[in-house]
Each structure stands twice: as structure tokens, then as C-alpha cells.
Image: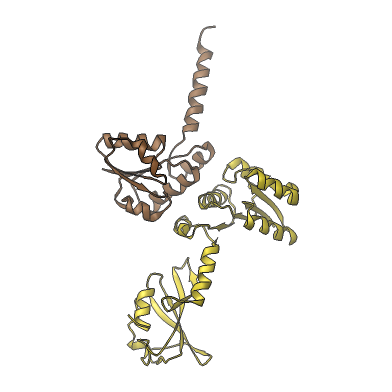
Amino acid sequence: MYVLIAGGGKVGSNLTRSLLRAGHELTLIEQRPYRYEKLEAEFEHQVLRGDATELFVLERAGIRRPPDLVVAATGDDEDNIVICQLSREKYGVGNVIARINDPRNQPYFDLLGISPTVSATGAIMGLIEHEVPEHGLIQLLELRKENLEIVEVTVDKNANCQGKRVRALRLPEGARLISVVRAGKAEIPDEETQLKVGDQVLAILEPGKEDELRRALLRD
Amino acid sequence: MKAMVIGCGRVGSAVALQLQGSGWDVTVVDEDEDALNRLGESWTGDFLVGHGMDLRVLREGGIEEADAVVVTTDGDNTNLVIAQAAQKHFEVPTVVVRVLDPARAQFYATRGLRIVCPTSSAIETLVGVVRQAERAPA
């Protein structure tokens, strides 16, 4: 396939190397002269020097073909947003992937419908949360488009839900228990399922309801 | 009427002062606190130090109640992203944004943004002046 990558930093250059090795056709766009020279020494004519948010640069890189995929991997989130918007909306590129540098900018990508996005900070934070859950809920999966997330809760001896049946729990609206793992065996809970210490409970909920769910299952 | 001006350079500061002069309640945002100096002694509005992409700063500056937002930072792409957020997310009734690159200005204008492109205006004026020579007597 034909891939266009904007930004030749660590992410962009390593992607270029991997994709070329896998036999794909590719153009990498890099703006900074010093970086460009180093990249050109390695990737030769497959690197183009310029600002990937300029239309004529994108066009020289073959955006009118259009590419099967555009990866916006610059170190600047606004640039990545504009690259994705131009690619999709002006040139009809079907697939774009955007790098997010500052996780605080995630709302802009969501608001402007740019997905999928990849953020190193977000990915590492996810791993940390999984290892050291602060609020007792471990986020397993975020379904951004559907505006839902799946979290895991372990029932300990002080948990509010311990010993209670599902129907007696005050689950927040928009939250549901989807599985209970007990002694390594998973079951789909119904109203009568009684929760016990050591249960690992999976719940699906709307983002923002974590605190309510935590209060219902664990503690205030 | 309440306005927010994001980016307090030569253009943003002058816009803010003129709006204040016409009775607007104006909040200015710039990431450089020295930019406040551009507003001078007569400035009575709010001035927030922060990046225009920071949603907390925008909310703190009252974007949710603003009647108009003017986006004039020194980055075209930053301006385009902030302006789209102001228009789509915060639903500010009047959003106007400066974009220096005519190509991007033209594309985003077709997508419903009110864009001022000083580069295009300069080109038009320069060509216009020169072409007046066509009609002038030799």
C-alpha cells in the first residue's frame, strides 16, 4: 500500500523503516533541514522536505493519488489535526492515524472526529493505572466512539457490594455488570448473583460515572 | 457584549483595544505574559496567561458566554483548531480567525469558518496597484 507519513522524528522515522522493510511504498515529509538530511541519507528519494500542513507539499508527496493511509506523526498536535483534516476532507484519504503529543489535546481530536489517535503518554498511563489502580477501578477498554468503557473491580472484604446480590446494588444509570470471575471461572451475572470477596467484576459504563460506580461497588 | 481575543500580538492587541473602546467586555489570552504590555495603560479587561489550545483557559476566560471570539495567534494551524473548537464545541455565535497561508485559508473557508487572510489581501492590493498602470497614460 501507499503510505504518507508527516514528521520524521523518532515515531515517523521508525515507522518509515518498518513499513519499507515490509515492502510498502511510502513518502516521509520532514520540515527541519538537519533532520531531513539525516533521513535523506537513509531513505533517499522517499523523504521530502517541507511543511506537511502546506497543500503544495502534500500534493508533491502524492496526496492526490490518494494514499491508502496518512500518518500524522509530527511533534505538534495542531499540525497533526490539520494534516488529518486536509487529507480526509480535501483529498479524500480513507484512513488517517494521528499522534497526540499532549494528552490534554485529546478533546480536540475527538471533537473534530479525528481517529484513531495514538498517544504515548496515554498508553503508558493506561499501563500504570492497570498496575496501580488509584480509585479501585481498572480501565480495560475505552470505546471512544460508542462513549463507553469497560472497567474491572476486585471485590475486597471492605467493599460495599460484598455479600450483596446484583439487584440490591445501586448501580449508576448507564452502568451494568457484564461478568464476574470467581476462582478463575467467568460467569455472566444476573439479578440474583451474589458478589463475594475476591470476585473480579467487569462493568461497562459511560465515562464520567466511575465515581458513582466505585461508590456502589467499593466504598464512599 | 463579550469578546475573547486569543493571541495578543500586533493584530490581536489592536483588535482587543478597539473592541474595548466600542464598549465590549474583552478577555485576552496569550501564552506570553509580556504580551500584556501591548495593551497599554488604558486596558481594563481581563488578561489570561495560557495556551489558546488549553480548554481550561478558554473556559476560565468565559468562552461559553462569549458573543464573539477572535483568533490571532502566530500559528495558522493553532488558529484553525481553536476556531473550530470555538465554533463547533462552544457554539460561539461569531468566530473569526486569521490564517496567513492563502491555501489553507481558502479550504477552511469552504468549511464554514470566517477567515481573514492578510496575505491574500496584500496580494490583491499589490496587484491592484500595479494594474492601475495599465489605465494610466504613458
Look at the image and name its color scheme: by chain
Residue A207: percent from left, percent from top:
41, 70
Residue A156 found in image quarter = bottom left
Residue A172: percent from left, percent from top:
34, 77
Q: What is the letter of the yellow chain?
A: A
For the C terminus of chain A, the image quarter is: bottom left
For the N terminus of chain A, the image quarter is: bottom right
Q: What is the letter of the brown chain?
A: B
State left or right for residue B18 relative to residue A27.
left
Q: Is residue A29 above or below residue A199?
A: above
Q: Is residue B120 above or below residue B78?
A: above
Residue B69: percent from left, percent from top:
35, 44
Res B119 visible: yes
Q: Which residue is rendered at x = 40% and y = 71% of the image? A: A206
Residue A150: percent from left, percent from top:
47, 76
Q: Which residue is rendered at x = 51% and y = 77% of the image? A: A131
State left or right for residue B12 relative to residue B131.
left
Res B90 visible: no
Q: Is residue A11 above or below residue A172?
A: above
Q: Nearer the viewer, residue A4 or B79?
A: B79
Q: Which residue is rendered at x = 31% and y = 34% of the image? A: B18
Residue A33 found in image quarter = top right
Outermost left residue: B23
